[in-house]
Image (cartoon, rainbow, N blue to C red):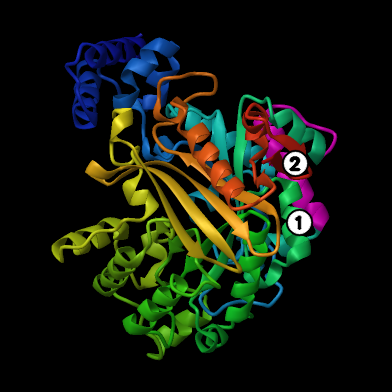
């Protein structure tokens, strides 16, 4: 009965306005536990389980844990493939692999890796467990951005790839389909719809045939381990590929309408800040690269790696936290408005790090460094209305803009809905007009804000911004002489495009202009 009393009184304190924020919530929880002589503080998920939908919506800003997980508009579900070697061998800095009983490039101690191991790397169990976990702490899971991590997925047998992705879809659908095609079809109307599917891989394991295959899997984004644009450095760390592989894979992906994310590793052996910044500058000035997104992971020394031996013997010194902060800050200041810095820093537990960045909040440190020098970052993430805490604005405050640039043998047009007064970004569409095709491609359509549940209006995602952005992309492509437009659509949002006059053609949603 004490537990029930605790949850009842905590709910009353929040609804009455006596508890106004998360700090006040924590104080109230501790006070109630003392008054009711509870042995430990119950998790918020237990309180949430007792709430009806209306009550939860009134309390969610205070009681929901980690709201940032859905502030960009979707619930991210990361799953890992089973341990398997990379085709080329092992990079000198890599802590994972079959010998370590963990996916390649992961220690096995990261949160996602631990969840994967606990669920025996089963895709169905991993996906189901993560969705349930997100729901338990108050997140909507109608729209899921699925990320497949761990090693070189596209080097695994096609049968493994198909089975793994099917298992993820089966979990989102709540039923086992006879094959992947049926699983995808069921997901179009499922409770948990896959609005995006990301595959992590190596650029030298991604050619035209593999690009077509991952599109059949339902992929909308690929993430390449690029590390640095320097052949000599890549060779020295036994990366197994050079810069040309990055160029080729990037073009293949963009020509097929996929979004492209680069993983970068500042501070590799033989690299200083000047060389890292030069590589970064080339990345956004040379049309052969121009990634849509970035993950920046400063090099860390982890036990059991060849790099660890080099560090022990004095042949290598990684960036300190202060050095990495300055490099990352410089990179953030140089990032164009059409790119998004997805992540900064790996999830490797600090006790496993022998040398390198020893603080877990490098993004915040870099932001402070920028502020101290009068600079700022204008990447997509730093401008999203949801992450900036902007919940309301007037239609007349929105400015519609277009940024155009050459990339991988075509023109990219980043059409955005902005709030100039506060440097806010409401949404955008990525339109690609290739040089040798009459089909325009929408590689991404995104509207930000707290996730709006399917079928409900009232939040940023359901105010018509997506339709307006798409209409502007269609009009621009039509004026440029293109005959049709093809959207690389997540399986779970095919219905959205069908409602706007698009038809299914293979892996795309297509409309005649």
Residue at 53% x, 30% y: name it: 141
Percent x, y for residue 197? 62, 46
Residue 212 numbered mark, or none: 1
Position of 402 with respect to 101 (left or right) is left
Whichever of callouts 2 and 1 sits on the residue coming sooner in the sequence is 2
Percent x, y for residue 137? 43, 29
Q: Quadrant of residue 434?
A: bottom right
Q: Quadrant of residue 281?
A: bottom left
Residue at 80% x, 60% y: name it: 157
Query: Is residue 169 a member of the stretch shown in magenta?
Result: yes
Instruction: Say few, some or many: other residues with alpha carbon within 10 Å of mark 2 (under 14 / 14 to 19 / 20 or more).
Output: many
**Location of the N terminus (image quadrant):** top left
Which element is circle 1 on?
helix
Using the image, determine if residue 48 lies above or below residue 481. Answer: above
Residue 166 numbered mark, or none: 2
Query: Is residue 251 a member of the stretch shown in magenta?
Result: no
**Location of the C terminus (image quadrant):** top right
Task: Looking at this view, name the residue that lies furthest to the right.
Answer: 178
Q: Which residues are magenta?
A: 158-179
Q: Main secondary structure of the magenta part?
A: helix
Residue 469 visible in the snapshot = yes
Which of the two discs, 2 and 1, sits closer to the camera? 1
């Amino acid at each position: 009965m004490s537990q029930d009393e605790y949850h009842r009184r905590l709910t009353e304190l929040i609804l009455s306005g006596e508890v106004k924020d998360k700090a006040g919530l924590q104080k109230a929880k501790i006070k109630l536990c003392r008054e009711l002589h509870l042995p430990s503080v119950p998790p918020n998920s237990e309180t949430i389980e007792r709430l009806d939908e209306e009550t939860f919506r009134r309390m969610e800003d205070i009681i929901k844990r980690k709201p940032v997980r859905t502030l960009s508009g979707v619930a991210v579900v990361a799953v890992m493939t089973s341990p398997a070697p990379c085709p080329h061998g092992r990079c000198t800095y890599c802590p994972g692999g079959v010998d370590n009983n963990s996916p390649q490039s992961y220690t096995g101690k990261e949160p996602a890796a631990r969840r994967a191991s606990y669920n025996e790397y089963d895709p169905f169990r991993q996906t189901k467990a993560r969705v349930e976990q997100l729901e338990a702490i108050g997140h909507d899971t109608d729209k899921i951005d699925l990320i497949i991590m761990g090693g070189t997925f596209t080097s695994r047998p096609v049968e493994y790839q198909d089975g793994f992705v099917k298992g993820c879809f089966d979990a989102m659908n709540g039923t086992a389909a006879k094959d992947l095609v049926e699983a995808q079809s069921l997901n179009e109307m499922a409770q948990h719809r896959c609005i995006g599917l990301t595959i992590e891989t190596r650029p030298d394991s991604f050619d035209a045939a593999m690009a077509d295959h991952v599109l059949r899997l339902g992929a909308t984004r690929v993430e390449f381990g690029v590390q640095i644009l320097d052949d000599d450095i890549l060779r020295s760390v036994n990366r197994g590929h050079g810069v040309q592989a990055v160029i080729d894979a990037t073009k293949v992906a963009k020509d097929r309408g996929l979004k492209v994310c680069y993983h970068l590793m500042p501070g590799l052996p033989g690299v200083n800040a000047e060389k890292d910044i030069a590589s970064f500058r080339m990345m956004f000035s040379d049309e052969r690269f121009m990634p849509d997104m970035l993950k920046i992971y400063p090099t860390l020394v982890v036990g059991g790696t060849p790099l660890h031996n080099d560090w022990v013997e004095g042949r290598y010194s990684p960036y300190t936290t202060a050095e990495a902060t300055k490099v990352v800050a410089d990179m953030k200041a140089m990032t164009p408005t059409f790119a998004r810095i997805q992540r900064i820093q790996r999830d490797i537990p600090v006790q496993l790090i022998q040398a390198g960045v020893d603080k877990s909040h490098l993004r915040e440190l870099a932001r402070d460094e920028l502020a101290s020098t009068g600079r700022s970052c204008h990447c997509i993430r730093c401008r999203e209305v949801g992450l900036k805490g902007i919940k309301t604005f007037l239609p007349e405050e929105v400015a519609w803009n277009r940024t155009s640039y050459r990339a991988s043998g075509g023109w990219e047009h980043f059409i955005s809905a902005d709030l100039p007064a506060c440097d806010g970004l409401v949404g955008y569409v990525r339109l690609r007009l290739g040089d040798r095709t009459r089909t325009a491609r929408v590689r991404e359509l995104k509207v930000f804000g707290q996730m709006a549940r399917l079928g409900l209006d009232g939040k940023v995602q359901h105010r018509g911004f997506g339709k307006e952005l798409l209409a502007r992309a269609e009009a621009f492509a039509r004026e440029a002489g293109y005959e049709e437009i093809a959207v690389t659509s997540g399986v779970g949002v095919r219905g959205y495009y069908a409602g706007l006059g698009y038809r299914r053609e293979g892996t795309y949603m297509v409309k005649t202009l």
